[in-house]
Image: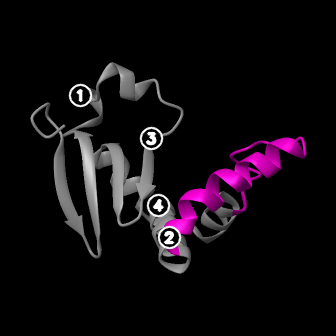
Amino acid sequence: MICAGGSLRRADHTIEFALAPGQGQVPRWAARCRFAAITFGHVIVGQSHEVLAVLRPHERVHVRQYERLGVLFFLAYPASSLMAWLQGRCPYLGNRFEQEAISLDPR
């Protein structure tokens, strides 16, 4: 990914990986994704460093959730989306981890 134009930055205790240097250079496939950033433990992957700067507070809530649950977070997050969907709610907005991140995001 770095060879394709992506770059890494350290931001406090996380590593941020941007797929493109600027939002105007985001690969077409990434621009079509339903999300602009995603967190894997202490690594946050985003479309660009511009997007990461905006979404950093939200994604850091997910980092803290991962710190609390460890690798179980990777099971608990999709399980929460599944439960929301089975209850007829939006799998994203009904996900308890997203609800926490949205409520703690100062934006």
Number of other residues with Cα within 10 Å of mark 4, as a class: few under 14, some 14 to 19, many 20 or more: many
Residue 6 in the image: state x and y as whole percent. Answer: 18, 40
Of labels 2 and 3, the one closer to you: 2
Instruction: State the quadrant of the C terminus.
Output: bottom right
Residue 97 in the image: state x and y as whole percent. Answer: 65, 63
Q: Name the residue under label 3.
A: 36
Q: Work out whether 32 lies above or below 45.
A: above
Q: Mark 4 points at which residue?
A: 59
Residue 72 in the image: state x and y as whole percent. Answer: 56, 67
On residue 66, which mark appears? 2
Which is more N-terminal, label 4 or label 3?
3
Amino acid identity at mark 2: Tyr
Q: Is residue 75 magenta?
A: yes
Q: Does the magenta stretch include residue 82?
A: yes
Which is more N-terminal, label 1 or label 4?
1
Mark 1 and mark 2 in contact? Answer it, CB < 8 Å: no
Secondary element under disc 2, as helix, strand or loop, is: helix
Which is more N-terminal, label 2 or label 4?
4
Which is more N-terminal, label 2 or label 1?
1
